[in-house]
Amino acid sequence: MKTSLRTLAPALFLLAACAPAIGTAQTPAQQPQQEVRYVTVSKFAMPQDTTQRRLLMMAIDSVMVPQARMDPNVLSYRLLTHNWGANSSDILIMAEYPNWAAIEAECTACVQWVQSKTPAAGTPERARWDAMGAAFQRAYEGHSDEIYSAQMRRAKQ
């Protein structure tokens, strides 16, 4: 096959256009660090039973949300319930973190909070606490977990 200047023209144009950038390309060490945040998403179904639904939401509101709010590793926390679209009873729990390590970082304040808030065994408060925990475990049994990353240069803040 004979190559002519006409068939090489597009390649030559690209080479000429890119030549200035080739000499100034930054190595990964020279490139500015892009801010990335990580978002964990847990998805599970809302119980159809009214009592179980109420206990589940009590567990989320009185145990999970306070811990997320006090956790210094969590930048933002959202509980989303399904409102419109396909017939769904999904609940999404989304937590945003500044980096990957923060996802698994310990929250000492959270551990202390749970220890101080857990009612004494044999009390009516402990029975309710345990019922909330059991309702959460039943709902969470078939959950899914995902971790997403977000380039903050593409975010509206």
Image (cartoon, rainbow, N blue to C red):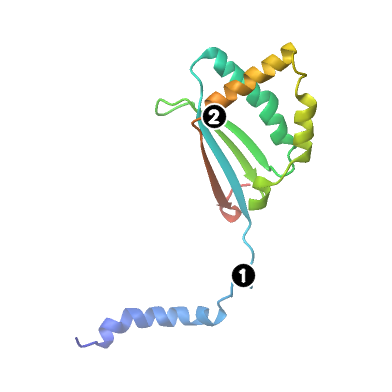
- Badge number at residue 87: none
Give the residue displayed 79% in from the left and 33% down from the top: 112
Q: Which residue is mark 1?
A: 31
Viewer-closest of 120 and 5: 120
**150 vs 27: above or below:** above
**13 vs 89: above or below:** below
Where is residue 55, by image quadrant? top right
**55 vs 10: above or below:** above
Viewer-closest of 60 and 139: 139
Residue contact at pointers 2 and 1, CB within 8 angstroms: no
- Split into 4 quadrants, where in the image is the N terminus? bottom left
Position of residue 88 measured from the top left corner of the image (x, y, whole percent): 43, 26
**1 vs 72: above or below:** below
Residue 124 is left or right of residue 149, and the answer is right
Q: Residues within 10 Å of mark 2 (few under 14, many from 20)?
A: some
Position of residue 124 measured from the top left corner of the image (x, y, whole percent): 72, 11
- Using the rendered image of the protein, determine whether residue 99 is visible from the camera's viewpoint: no
- Between the C-alphas of marks 2 and 1, the distance is 42 Å
Badge 1 amino acid: Gln
Viewer-closest of 69 and 133: 133
Residue 143 is left or right of residue 73, and the answer is left
Nearest-to-viewer mark from 2 and 1: 2
Q: Secondary structure at mark 1?
A: loop
Give the residue displayed 60% in from the left and 53% down from the top: 152
Q: Residue furthest top?
A: 124
Position of residue 44 measured from the top left corner of the image (x, y, whole percent): 51, 30
- The mark nearer the N terminus, 2 or 1, is 1
Q: Residues within 10 Å of mark 1 (few under 14, many from 20)?
A: few
Q: Which residue is mark 2?
A: 140
